[in-house]
Amino acid sequence: MMFARILGLFPLALLFPIAACGSAGDAGGTAAAQENAVSIFASEEGVDTHSYARPLEARVTHVALDLNADFDAQRMVGTATLDLEVAEGAEEVVLDSKDLEIREVVNGDGETLQWEMGEDSGDAHGAPLTIRLGGATRIKITYASAPGAEALQWLEPEQTAGGETPYLFSQGQAILNRSWIPTQDSPGIRQSWDARITAPRGIRVVMSAEMLTPDGEPVDGEPGRLAYRFKMDEPVAPYLIAIAAGDIAFQQLGERTGVYAEPSMLADAAAEFEDLEEMVIAAEALYGEYRWGRYDLLVLPPSFPFGGMENPRLTFVTPTVIAGDKSLVSLIAHELAHSWSGNLVTNATWDDFWLNEGFTVYFENRIMEAVYGTEQAAMLADLGWTDMMEDVEAVGGLTAADTALHLDLDGRDPDDGMTDIAYEKGAVFLRTIERTVGRARFDAWLRDYFDRHAFQPQTSAGLLSDMRANLFEGDEADRIGLDEWVYEPGLPENAVHIQSNRFRAVDQAIENFVDNGSIAVINWPEWTTQERQRFLNGLPRDLSEERLETLDESFDFSEARNSEIRFAWLKLAIANRFDPARDSIEEFLLSMGRRKFVAPLFEALMEEGDWGAPLARRIYAEARSRYHSVTTGTVDELVDTGDD
Ligand code: BES
Ligand code: ZN
């Protein structure tokens, strides 16, 4: 209710007498794309309940940031200048904000404008910032972010690999960027942007845009500071504006690919990601030209809360993906795939998050197949199937309604939609369609779909009507049961399950071990990481101390340097209250803050009462200040700190 938008205030025809606006000469700036966005905002599924913006009245088309990164105060301080597309008769623009300190708002001529900060929702949504336009189509806001801004994490030097320079990074998705940028923080409201950022000498700034300071070389800023400049001419969803700053070095990998990392991590990172250029080439061969110029990776400090984040031109990745043997690089294929699914064609609202992630998991697997072969791709898809089934069967605590692809997240945190339903059921849906129409036809359609909807928002309804118009023949759509797939809970019967042949041997090894404790057919040294994951996740949750000891001693699980293996092992160890793993649990949880690992382990510890809860509380008391707000936001709900 609170976030309900009032539509129909203006008759649509009067709105936006399409003057080509914003960035000149790109696909997103065309009249057709603008018109399409407007019709999506007016459609039932296009209304974003997670933003206060009223895009049919006034819409941000360009953001220009001029900010100082103040490491002492842990604030971004400066100005945001917004260009607006204003409908006839509209007198104000509504922006999203979260704990921003607004100092002044002026128009393009420097004249003061009236503004009002509405009531804060008390949750992730923040507060509406309403500005009276008085005819202005450009506004300049002088402001500062709060020291605890959710999108930003300011790290002390000790929290970095080098240990000498502080570090800053942002995480915008889903609705965190409103805590450092006053704009319309809605994925359907695409904005081109540019930025001038200053930082103390010795701290290098990178952003998810083209670097204008040649070769990343900054120019003099205020005394003791250097200024870096960036621009993104393509209109992007605002959650994709991202920044990082610290002791950051760069190594080129391929013609248009490279990796940024702290100097001591750079060589390992470059080795791990040596196939990056090949992945981009494979992706282009599948679904069309890569449209963003460069594709670089930034390896973050270990507190980065996600595996990866598809910030345009500059994917952010966790250092836990560096396993030493390239075994976890499907994560890179995933973030790369978002350069099409998500960054080109974007979910119009978080209710259709599956449009970003389901398409991306499907595409990711096709890249993996092209670069590493069918069996590798099958293993990854099969692991995804198991994850999906846990959510479908509500093992992960989802309600039936949460197992539909299209969700209604009104009044909830968009984070609630970040489940394996969006990712894996979404991908299985596309595999089921692929199987029905044949790969050749599916691929041709998808490539064309990305082109036709490039730089535009999309809804479930929009996708289905596109498929009906451009993909299906005869009764295919009915045979697949599109509406059931998208709008109904659970998993339709025709779901295509890709099964890995190699997992049969692994499952056999599990059976043998369970039957008689024999490790003879556990071919651990020969197994890939994916077979190892299948093994550890496939073992029954109740194993005797003796059996766990046999495993740990034979294969050194507690010492595993591969984060996925370590995680799978520790889940099993905790479920069995296996004492010898306690040090390993502590070390792992203090070594990184990736939510996917951290949250389930704390949850499992808390479930083990006297055995696990005190350990969880002790570790969390030490770890909490090192984690990003995304991770503490989840773990705070799991671990009572015993303070109150
Ligand atoms: N875009 C997501 C991360 C995300 C989703 C952040 C929703 C905030 C809200 C990213 O592409 C992603 O899915 N990352 C995964 C890894 C991937 C291989 C499944 C992750 O971080 O675990
Ligand atoms: Zn993703």
Image (spheres, rainbow, N blue to C red):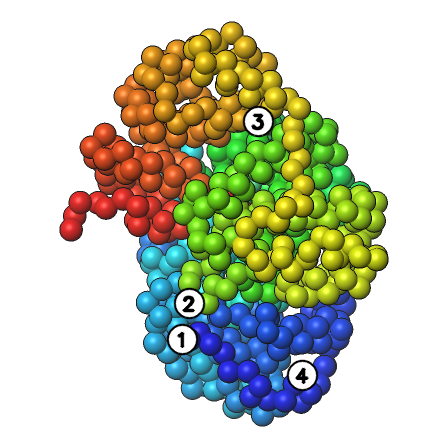
- Say if mark 4 contacts mark 3, CB within 8 Å: no
Marks 4 and 3 sit apart, C-alpha to C-alpha, by 52 Å
* Three-letter code for the amino acid on which mark 2 is drawn: Gly
- Say whether residue 151 is left or right of residue 438: left
Residue at (69%, 61%) from the top-left corner?
Answer: 463
Label 2 element class: loop
Q: Is mark 4 within 8 Å of ligand 1?
A: no
Q: Looking at the image, is 534 positioned above or below residue 349?
A: above
Q: Identify the residue position indicated by label 2 in the image.
A: 411
Label 3 element class: helix
Marks 3 and 2 sit apart, C-alpha to C-alpha, by 38 Å
Q: Identify the residue position indicated by label 1 in the image.
A: 2
- Say whether residue 444 is left or right of residue 115: right
Which mark identifies residue 239?
none
Residue 591 x %, y %: 37, 32
Residue at (43%, 42%) from the top-left corner?
Answer: 395
Q: Which of marks 3 and 1 precedes in the sequence?
A: 1
In which quarter of the view is residue 363 placed? Answer: top right
Q: Which of marks 1 and 4 precedes in the sequence?
A: 1
